[in-house]
Image (cartoon, grey):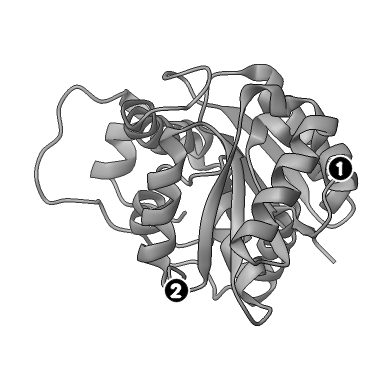
Amino acid sequence: MVKPHILLINPNTSAEITEAIRQLALAEIGDQAVLTAVTAPFGARYIATRTAVTIAAHAVIDAYAQATAEGRKYDAVVVACFGDPGVDALKEITAVPVLGFADGGLIAAAAEPGSFAIATIGEAWRDMLIELALRRGFADRLAGVILIDENGRLPEIAGPQITAAAKTLGVSRVIVGGTGLIPILDAIADQVGVTVIDPHRSTLHDAIRATAGAPEAEQHRPASNSPFAGLSPALLGLLQNPRIA
């Protein structure tokens, strides 16, 4: 059986984070798929503001355009950021399944009855994640966003913080997200007294399932009938010249 080819796009400019994502994907689904991981060609090294998220969305579709140049094809795309910049734009311009870590985590958490919480690093992400949950139809299930302070990169500190906040919110499971946390997420989970949902792993498995159920690719269309200016040649070509995605 031919393995699906999955494109992983890191929306920040950290090659180290891209490699951490790639290694996680290899460990989780590497026996089920061919994996290509790419890094955003421009933008923030760490996405922590709305400005950085907006730039990252542009960088994601530019990275996709470069990755699919010269007829290269993928069976699914994973936007590997816990915040999903550019996911909706990619869905508009490609026929293959497009998934994001935050959306994947929300879907996994909502699969069980009752409410849940999200835990992540970065004050700006609180409102953005609440807004994402609202757009995706999960706002009534999200009890709150737990902000881990920068010391939370130590699992022995993050674990008790998350546990105490989860008990206050009255939830029995928490999505712990953030690509910067991937190397230590298992260690954090060991210190948390409620069920931890890893949105990165769950989304990777969702991508495999999505390729199995995806219809045969159709031609995608340009995102707009308006002319574009100032874009990279790859992105300009993608938007102006429909091709099989």
| In-front residue for pair 32/1 | 32
Give the image location of residue 127, x and y in percent: 38, 46
Give the image location of residue 194, x and y in percent: 80, 59
Instruction: Tell me what residue is drawn at x 47 percent, y 54 percent.
Output: 245
Q: Residue furthest bottom?
A: 113
**In the rendered image of this protein, does residue 87 appear above or below residue 62?**
below
In terms of image quadrants, where is residue 139? bottom left
**Looking at numbered disc 2 in the image, what kind of residue is underneath it?**
Asp
Give the image location of residue 164, x and y in percent: 71, 49
Instruction: Tell me what residue is drawn at x 38 percent, y 37 percent.
Output: 57
Measured in 3D between alpha carbons, the distance from the residue under mark 2 to the one under mark 1, in whole angstroms, is: 28 Å
In terms of image quadrants, where is residue 132? bottom left
- The secondary element bearing badge 1 is classed as helix
Q: Quadrant of the N terminus?
A: bottom right
**In the rendered image of this protein, does residue 207 appear above or below residue 216?**
above
Q: Which residue position holds label 2?
A: 140
Q: Which residue position holds label 1?
A: 186
Number of the front mark, 2 or 1:
2
Q: How packed is label 2: few (under 14 Cα within 10 Å), some, or many (20 or more)?
A: few
Say if residue 14 shows up in the picture: yes
| In-front residue for pair 66/145 | 145
**In the rendered image of this protein, does residue 109 appear above or below residue 100?**
below
**In the rendered image of this protein, does residue 31 appear above or below residue 212?**
above
| In-front residue for pair 115/98 | 115
- The secondary element bearing badge 2 is classed as loop
Q: Which mark is residue 55?
A: none
Instruction: Tell me what residue is drawn at x 88 percent, y 38 percent.
Output: 187
**Looking at numbered disc 1 in the image, what kind of residue is underneath it?**
Asp
